[in-house]
Amino acid sequence: MKLVDAEDLKKNLGSGWVNYKFVMRHIDETPPVDAVKVVRCETCKYWEPEYGEDGGVYGKCTLWGGTCESEVTEHTWFCADGKEKE
């Protein structure tokens, strides 16, 4: 997968009518952004969800024996060691 800056791509394409081959060529020529795919807690195999009294979704990371930097994590958090659930 190639991640690109869509705003930059739109700026370079300009406005007006363009054809499919023109757009595809521009997408191919657009340099990728410097990004890393992350695994969020909610999709990580090491995360065990719990539900807070406020309705929020929290949980514990079992990767380090339940001792993540933060004892409790929110479902949208992520870390460098996460692995997707199968």
Image: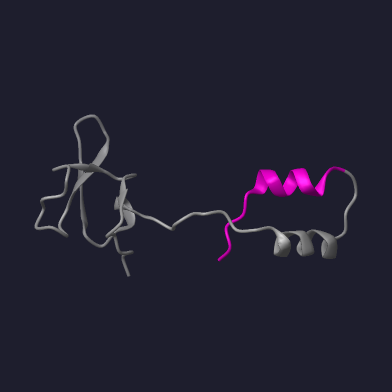
* Quadrant of the rendered image containing residue 31: bottom right
Q: Residue furthest top?
A: 54
In the rendered image, the quadrant that contains the N terminus is bottom right
Find residue 73 and report its horizontal and vertical position in percent: 22, 43
When the figure is inspected, residue 49 is found, relative to residue 24, above or below; the finding is above
**10 falls in the magenta region:** yes
When the figure is inspected, residue 53 is found, relative to residue 13, above or below; the finding is above
In the rendered image, the quadrant that contains the C terminus is bottom left
Find residue 58 and report its horizontal and vertical position in percent: 23, 42
Task: Left or right? Give the position of 60 relative to 13.
Answer: left
* Quadrant of the rendered image containing residue 71: top left
Task: Left or right? Give the position of 29 relative to 50.
Answer: right
Q: Residue furthest bottom?
A: 86
Residue drawn at point x = 69 percent, y = 58 percent: 30
**Number of marks in picture:** 0
Q: Residue furthest right?
A: 17
- Give the magenta range: 1-15
Residue drawn at point x = 77 percent, y = 63 percent: 24
Find residue 48 and report its horizontal and vertical position in percent: 19, 53
In the foreground, 13 or 63? 13
Question: In this figure, which colouring scheme has been used for the structure?
Answer: one colour
Task: Left or right? Give the position of 41 relative to 4.
Answer: left
Residue drawn at point x = 10 percent, y = 50 percent: 67
Find residue 64 and report its horizontal and vertical position in percent: 13, 58
**31 falls in the magenta region:** no
